[in-house]
Image (cartoon, rainbow, N blue to C red):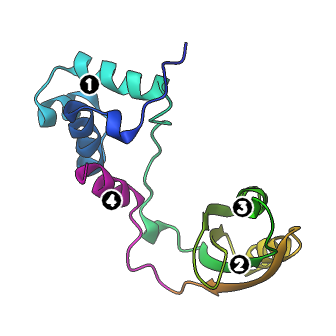
Amino acid sequence: MKSEKITLDQLNSLDKKILLSIFDTRETNLSVISKKVGVSKSTVHNRLKKMKSSNFLKGVIPLINQTNLDKSITAISLINAKYGPEYGESIGSKIAKIKGVWAVYFVLGSIDFVALIRARNKTELGSIVNELSRTPGVERSETIMALNTAKEDFPESLKLIIKDQ
C-alpha cells in the first residue's frame, strides 16, 4: 500500500539527518546510520520505509568507482528542438527513452536540452548520437565527449539540496 506522496519540504529533521548520513557514509546499513544519527535501527528502518512507500526514496543503488570504468565513455549532448506546445515534456521524454541516455534536462538559453550519455565505446556512442538525431522534434545536436572525469558525485548534489532545507 502506497502512502501519500511527500516532498522535500515535508521531510522532518530526522528524515533529513538519515538521508545526509547515507550520503556522507555511502552506507545503507541500519546500524551505521542509527549510530551516526543517534536513533534506533528500527526508527531508521521505519523512516526509510515511509520515504520509500511515499515514492520520495526510489531505492538505493551502488556507487561504482569511476576509475574502474576505464572502458566507458561519458558524453554531453546539447540539443536544439522544434518549438511547439509542451515540447519540453514531449521531446524530453523521447530523448529520455534512448538507451545510454541517463539524464535529460530541459534548459533555458540558446539550446533546449542537455542529455548526459554513457556508452561502452565510440561505436556505441555513435549509435546513441544517431538515434538522438533521428528523434522526432530534435532539429540539431552537438555532442561533446569527456576525456576525463574531474568530479562526478550525484549523491553530493542531492546532499546539498537537503542541507539547504
Circle on res. 156: 4
For label 1, the SS is helix
Q: Which residue is mark 2?
A: 79
Q: Quadrant of residue 133?
A: bottom right
Q: Are marks 4 and 3 in contact (CB under 8 Å)?
A: no
Vertical position of residue 22 compared to residue 15: above or below: below
Q: Residue at x 23, y 19 (%)?
A: 43
What percent of the width, then of the height, locates residue 164?
24, 54
| Type of amino acid under label 3 | Gly
For label 3, the SS is helix
| Type of amino acid under label 2 | Ile
Cα distance, mark 1 to mark 2? 42 Å
Cα distance, mark 4 to mark 2? 26 Å
Circle on res. 92: 3
Q: Are marks 2 and 3 in contact (CB under 8 Å)?
A: no
Circle on res. 44: 1
Q: Earlier in the sequence, mark 1 or mark 3?
A: 1
Q: Which is in the foreground here, disc 4 or disc 3?
A: 3
Q: Earlier in the sequence, mark 4 or mark 1?
A: 1
Vertical position of residue 60 compared to residue 34: above or below: below
What percent of the width, then of the height, locates residue 149?
44, 78
Q: Earlier in the sequence, mark 4 or mark 3?
A: 3
Q: Earlier in the sequence, mark 2 or mark 3?
A: 2
Circle 2 crowding by C-alpha within 10 Å: few under 14, some 14–19, many from 20: many
Cα distance, mark 2 to mark 3? 10 Å
Q: Quadrant of the N terminus?
A: top right
Q: Are marks 1 and 2 in contact (CB under 8 Å)?
A: no
